[in-house]
């Protein structure tokens, strides 16, 4: 199953990498062809404007993958730096960092995003991912800090200290491998949330609206275009939904593989 | 035991379903505890306004018919309008209704900026059943402004506000903004729990999900009215309304609705039918002409030629009427009435012509952004369709959704390229001064947004149009403004919006007028107000 995850993920990456070059996307509407069924011309039918759904999925995959991955990466790095840093350094730095985390946890993101949308334009998916990551890391940072604080008093860390292992060794060889499963699971959750959150950000106007964004496709299908209410519109609804589910499932399987790689007990089994 | 339990369960379910004679619709209001019954203060009252309050007359634009409500008749000269009120009218608290209440409403309404005060000098109440409006500026619209304004302020409950308003100057140039603000604050501070009016229905309760209104038994036309009450569900989102319609739980509602969804709803629920009156407004794209390339008239013309409005209309407003390539500052369906049948002669018609557009749209130089208000499905779809068409023409364009308040701010500050907006709007007076005023009046939002130099001459024409009683002069001024608007290409109209009013001759209510009835032309002035008017006129009856 772990291999299946890798295969699905690689397929998505391949689609995102070369798909848009091979499959053209005609964004204009062809009203008379709306909600067309599966055909040789339209592999996954058409949407409410008669646009090809498969082409939208392919063209949306690059942005979606970049947004999901970059949000996950930025959020995990920020959480690691702040959470692990504050636990290891302690004292005033710990108090300051915990204070910063609390501020980020309590500041309501929605009104702040609305204000930001008046000031800034975000064009590329990496910056978009960073923006989403800004509101995704604090909870993880707090959990990591708590885990590291607990771990510091566990026997194997005490032993490492008695054996005069360096701080870097303790951090990277003793503590970090124990955090990896937790980090990979959170990476997936954050990446998943990024897809749905991206719709909210588009609705706020912080980034341009893209009808080929999978989350936006789902939103348009379920709410704006009424595909949810139409038998002929179900395919348009199911296509982005299935893509999102498959993508997340592949991430979960890959996360399981990562966990296995870092956990010797799982490797033995 | 099982049967008893089932009985209790079914009885519970039955209690949730409104009985025959109860009109079920949906609308918006502030959820309790924010809800209040002050019709002047922000928030509050909500959709109940149309059922609890009423005006002196109901106006039907098609045929220009005035149907008596609180008033029986009127007579007028250019200088004054004399209205004779219906006797035996009572407020919901039992107090008698009189001319003092009409005067109180307009006087208190001055603080809220009622448009009538541009024309009105003072109101006289010679007796309890007569009101005389004395005009400072006689105009073709002042009669409607006086006769259709809901009467919401009973004099017996507003004495302190009327006392506070005494001596406050009403004329422009003499007004005291500070004093007005202080009195407005006093007015807004009042928070009765429920609204109280003279209308055919009185509020019983309001919750986060429902409003319940009962028939007002002392209503002066009670013998003519057959309905027992109104139940209003909270609107929320359009999809919720579509679900209600699927389930047959609403008797009348006017949601934005894609063509296919409407067809599916009608197929599933045969007791429903649709009326499609014009909404008396036009949707399109306002252009910010401050910066290049939109500063160039030829580029703007290229945009006007390059947009396939029929394709946009199909997506964004399937029930609407496609704009025919003219931007007149009037709703297209009213153009002939106000400009004559030769109205398009001498005007540039920007019919869809992609080749011409390509020639004019060269060297855009940058990506254009089309702004649309979040939550307005039709405007968002309009923007999206326009952006994709421009991209196909080689002009890079994207869409940006913006929240309501911020949207207005960005428009006012000129921080946008192109924005999807309502253009010409002719309600509630259905007069060209209203719609041309949106483009050319001194405080015109659309001209301000476009950034074109303000035309003093056009402002004067609008000011004259507002008070012109000569039909020939009215047509001449409207024509001049239409020409100026059309040739500036600061606004590209895409379609005239039509409402989709779903009505159900179903298990609770029946008697909806047929599609060709002129009564539906009143829908854009307030569709709930029309439902209430139909109830008062006796059209709506409990289902047999």
Image (cartoon, grey):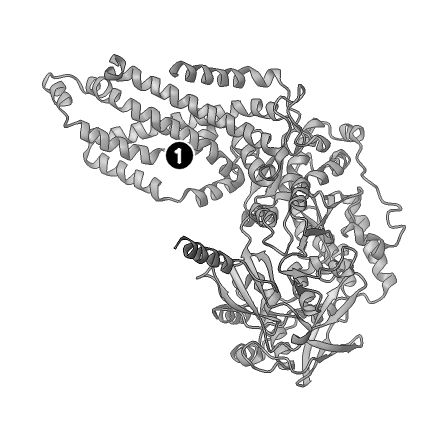
Residue A196 visible, this angle: yes
Percent x, y of residue B466? 76, 63
Q: In which quarter of the image is residue B135?
A: bottom right
Percent position (x, y) of residue A141? 30, 33
Q: Nearer the viewer, residue B50 or B41?
A: B50
User: A121 and A19: which one is in front?
Assistant: A19
Q: In this view, does B20 lie to the left or right of B514?
A: left
- Which type of secondary structure does the marked residue at label 1 adopt? loop
Let me know if residue B119 appears in the view.
no
Label 1 resides on the chain identified as A
Please determine whether, in this image, residue B126 is positioned above or below residue A215. below
Residue located at (52% from left, 22% from top) = A62
Q: How many marks?
A: 1
Q: In this view, does A22 lie above or below B35?
A: above
Image spot of residue B355 (x, y percent)? 80, 28
Left or right of residue A170: residue B280: right
* Residue marked by disc 1: A134
Q: Where is the C terminus of chain A found, in terms of image quarters? A: top left
| Pointer 1 local density, CA inside 10 Å: few below 14, some 14–19, many at least 20 | some
Camera-side residue of A173 and B316:
B316
Q: Is residue B21 left or right of residue A110?
A: right
- From the top left corner, tell me how far across and down residue A58 is, in percent: 57, 22
Q: Picture quarter containing residue A101?
A: top left
Q: Residue furthest left?
A: A162
In the rendered image, the vertical position of residue B238 relative to residue A148, given as above or below: below
């Amino acid at each position: 199953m772990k291999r299946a995850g890798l295969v699905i993920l690689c397929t998505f990456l391949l689609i995102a990498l070369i798909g848009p070059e091979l499959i053209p996307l005609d964004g204009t509407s062809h009203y008379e062809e709306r909600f067309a069924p599966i055909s040789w011309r339209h592999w996954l039918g058409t949407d409410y404007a008669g646009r090809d759904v498969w082409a939208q999925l392919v063209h949306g995959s690059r942005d979606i993958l970049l947004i999901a991955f970059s949000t996950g990466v930025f959020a995990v790095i920020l959480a690691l730096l702040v959470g692990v840093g504050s636990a290891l350094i302690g004292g005033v730095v710990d108090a300051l960092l915990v204070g910063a985390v609390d501020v980020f946890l309590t500041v309501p993101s929605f009104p702040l995003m609305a204000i930001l949308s008046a000031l800034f334009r975000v064009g590329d998916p990496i910056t978009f991912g960073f923006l989403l990551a800004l509101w995704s890391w604090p909870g993880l940072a707090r959990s990591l800090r708590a885990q590291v604080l607990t771990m510091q008093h566990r026997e194997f860390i005490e032993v490492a200290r008695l054996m005069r292992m360096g701080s870097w060794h303790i951090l990277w060889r003793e503590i970090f491998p124990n955090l990896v499963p937790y980090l990979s699971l959170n990476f997936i959750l954050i990446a998943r949330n990024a897809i749905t959150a991206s719709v909210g950000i588009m609705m706020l106007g912080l980034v341009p609206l893209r009808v080929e964004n999978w989350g936006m496709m789902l939103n348009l299908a379920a709410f704006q275009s009424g595909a949810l209410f139409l038998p002929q519109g179900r395919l348009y609804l199911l296509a982005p939904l299935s893509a999102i589910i498959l993508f997340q499932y592949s991430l979960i399987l890959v996360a399981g593989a990562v966990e296995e790689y870092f956990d010797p007990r799982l490797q033995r089994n | 035991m099982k049967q008893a339990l089932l009985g209790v369960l079914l009885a519970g379910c039955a209690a949730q379903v409104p009985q025959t004679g109860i009109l079920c619709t949906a609308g918006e209001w502030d959820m309790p505890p924010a809800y209040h019954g002050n019709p002047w203060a922000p928030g509050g009252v909500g959709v109940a306004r149309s059922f609890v309050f009423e005006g002196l007359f109901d106006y039907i634009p098609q045929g220009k018919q005035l149907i008596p409500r609180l008033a029986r008749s009127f007579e007028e000269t250019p200088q004054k309008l004399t209205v004779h009120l219906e006797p035996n009218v009572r407020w919901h608290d039992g107090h008698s209704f009189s001319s003092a209440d009409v005067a109180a409403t307009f006087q208190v309404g001055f603080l809220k900026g009622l448009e009538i005060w541009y024309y009105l000098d003072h109101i006289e109440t010679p007796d309890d059943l007569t009101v005389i409006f004395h005009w400072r500026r006689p105009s073709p619209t002042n009669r409607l402004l006086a006769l259709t304004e809901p009467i919401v302020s009973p004099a017996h409950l507003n004495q302190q506000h009327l006392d506070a308003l005494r001596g406050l100057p009403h004329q422009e140039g003499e007004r005291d903004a500070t004093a007005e603000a202080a009195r407005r604050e006093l007015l807004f501070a009042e928070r009765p729990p429920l609204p109280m009016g003279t209308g055919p229905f009185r509020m019983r309760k309001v919750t986060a999900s429902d409003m319940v209104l009962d028939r007002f038994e002392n209503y002066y036309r009670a013998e003519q009215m057959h309905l027992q009450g109104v139940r209003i569900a909270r609107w929320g989102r359009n999809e919720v309304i579509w679900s209600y319609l699927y389930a047959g739980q609403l008797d009348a509602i006017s949601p934005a609705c894609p063509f296919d969804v409407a067809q599916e709803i009608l197929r599933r629920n045969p007791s429903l039918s649709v009326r499609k009156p014009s909404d008396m407004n036009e949707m399109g794209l306002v252009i910010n002409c401050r910066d290049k390339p939109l500063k160039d008239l030829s580029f703007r013309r290229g945009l006007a030629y390059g947009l396939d409005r029929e394709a946009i209309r199909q997506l964004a407003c399937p029930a609407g009427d496609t704009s025919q390539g003219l931007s007149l500052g009037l709703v297209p369906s009213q153009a002939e009435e106000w400009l004559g049948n030769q109205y398009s002669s001498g005007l540039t018609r920007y019919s869809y012509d992609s080749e011409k557009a390509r020639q004019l749209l060269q060297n855009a130089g940058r990506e254009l952004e089309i702004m649309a208000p979040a939550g307005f499905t039709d405007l968002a779809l309009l923007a999206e369709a326009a952006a994709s068409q421009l991209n196909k023409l080689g002009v890079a364009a994207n869409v940006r959704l913006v929240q309501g308040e911020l949207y207005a701010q960005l428009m006012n500050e000129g921080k946008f390229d192109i924005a999807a907006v309502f253009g010409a709007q002719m309600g509630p007076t259905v007069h060209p001064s209203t719609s041309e005023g949106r483009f050319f009046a001194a405080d015109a939002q659309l001209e301000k947004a476009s950034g074109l130099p303000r035309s003093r001459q056009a402002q004067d024409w609008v000011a004259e149009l507002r008070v012109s009683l000569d039909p020939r002069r009215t047509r001449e001024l409207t024509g001049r403004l239409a020409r100026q608007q059309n040739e500036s290409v600061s606004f590209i109209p895409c379609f005239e919006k039509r409402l989709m009013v779903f009505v159900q001759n179903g298990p609770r209510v029946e008697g909806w007028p047929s599609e060709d009835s002129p009564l539906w032309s009143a829908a854009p002035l307030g569709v709930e107000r029309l439902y209430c008017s139909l109830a008062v006129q006796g059209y709506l009856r409990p289902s047999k």
